[in-house]
Amino acid sequence: MRLPSRVPLGVFPTPLDPLPNLSRHLGREVLAKRDDLTGLALGGNKIRKLEMLMAVAQQEGADVVLTSGAAQSNHCRSTAAAARRLGMDVVLLLFEDRHTDVQGNLLLDHLLGAEVRLQPRAEWPPAQSRLDDAAADLRKVGRKPYVVPYGGSGPLGAAAYAWGYLELLDQLRGRAPGCVVCVTSSGGMHAGLVAGAVARGRPAPVVGVSVADPATDCEARVLKLAVETAGLIEAPPAEAADAKVLDGWQGDGYGVPSAAGREAIELVARLEGIFLDPVYTGKAMAALLASAAELPEPIVFVHSGGAPALFAYAQELVRH
Ligand SMILES: Cc1ncc(COP(=O)(O)O)c(C=O)c1O
């Protein structure tokens, strides 16, 4: 396996923490891979991806970075911070939804000095062509733009999670994980973890949890990306059985907190003093809590971050 080069942005390896109180509560051993603690600009999984993506931006001599996401996108906040750290400007195409108050991630985007271009909700999900058009306009005025794909989820961003899987195996010091549970959204993190697992001979299955799309759509997306990622890192390709996604935890869809997700956020905060988030990790933890009896131990939960969005979702989180 050959991992792409990286530019240092975050703090790695991230901790692998036992969750003793949650484990006792469930009667199952649960560990957390703390990719919420990647360090830069309140952390999260995108910092790991950006170490690889921004290495290419730097090699290409980019002076401005463009990307896209929801108004409360963790990915956009992380990309803005990475660009700033490397002396680049940043343009964010953000999509209007019920969370466009200057709070949470959107507040941080403004503090980072990102140029925020709000797009009508009807244009969601963001077509790559919209980002490419914005980049072409910047080229016309002499800028050198670099486009980070939606969610940072091309093969290059996903390769960062093959690295994440190897990091996790090292931290377990020869002990095999039972399974690895993660969020599946744009699919890069999940696909990279699968690529890492396959490259190391499948020591433990990766179980994704969809937070928006039907599980079958996610599985197809993750498999395709895992195969492309394996090509990039010169590893054997994944097969369909490697890309499994749990259904039923999406609630009312992307960016809408679910009752089970809210309960999971409260439970983990109260048992472990750890904050999950309302869009991604709360829903994934809800799936883990419900499936724990059937999941092989130790269950490694990838905490991929997102807590800054809690503040933008305050009304929906306390109303219940
Ligand atoms: C906190 C958090 N967890 C998980 C994900 C999902 O990662 P991916 O888009 O690679 O599926 C995201 C993506 O934005 C995220 O912000």
Image (cartoon, rainbow, N blue to C red):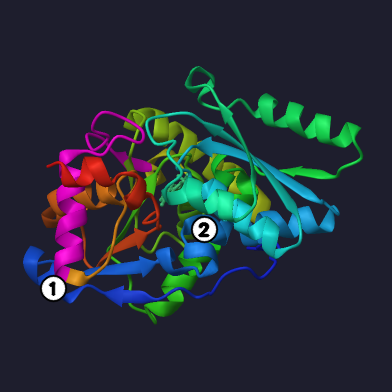
Quadrant in the picture for the C terminus? top left
Residue 245: x percent and y percent? 33, 40
Q: Earlier in the sequence, mark 1 or mark 2?
A: 1
Quadrant in the picture for the N terminus? bottom right
Q: In the picture shown, does residue 208 fall above or below 296?
A: above
Mark 1 or 2: in front is 1
Residue 183: x percent and y percent? 36, 48
* Residue at mark 1 to residue at mark 2: CA–CA distance: 27 Å
Q: In the picture shown, does residue 15 fall above or below 95?
A: below
| Mark 1 beta carbon near ligand 1 (under 8 Å) | no
Q: Is residue 268 magenta?
A: yes
Q: Answer with left or right where residue 266 lies relative to residue 228.
A: left
Residue 279's disc is none
Which amino acid type corresponds to the residue marked 2 in the rendered image? Tyr
Which amino acid type corresponds to the residue marked 1 in the rendered image? Asn
| Residue labelled with disc 2 | 161
In the foreground, 42 or 190: 42
| Mark 2 beta carbon near ligand 1 (under 8 Å) | yes
Residue 162: x percent and y percent? 53, 59
Element under disc 1: helix
| Residue labelled with disc 1 | 21
Residue 104: x percent and y percent? 42, 50
CA neighbours of label 1 inside 10 A, class few (<14), some (14 to 19), many (20+): some
Q: Answer with left or right where residue 261 lies relative to residue 278.
A: left
> Could you tell me which residue is drawn at 64 percent across and 62 percent down?
51
CA neighbours of label 2 inside 10 A, class few (<14), some (14 to 19), many (20+): many
Element under disc 2: helix
* Residue 276 appears in the figure: yes
Q: Is residue 291 magenta?
A: no
> Could you tell me which residue is drawn at 36 percent across and 74 percent down?
16
Specify the segment rendered in magenta: 244-271
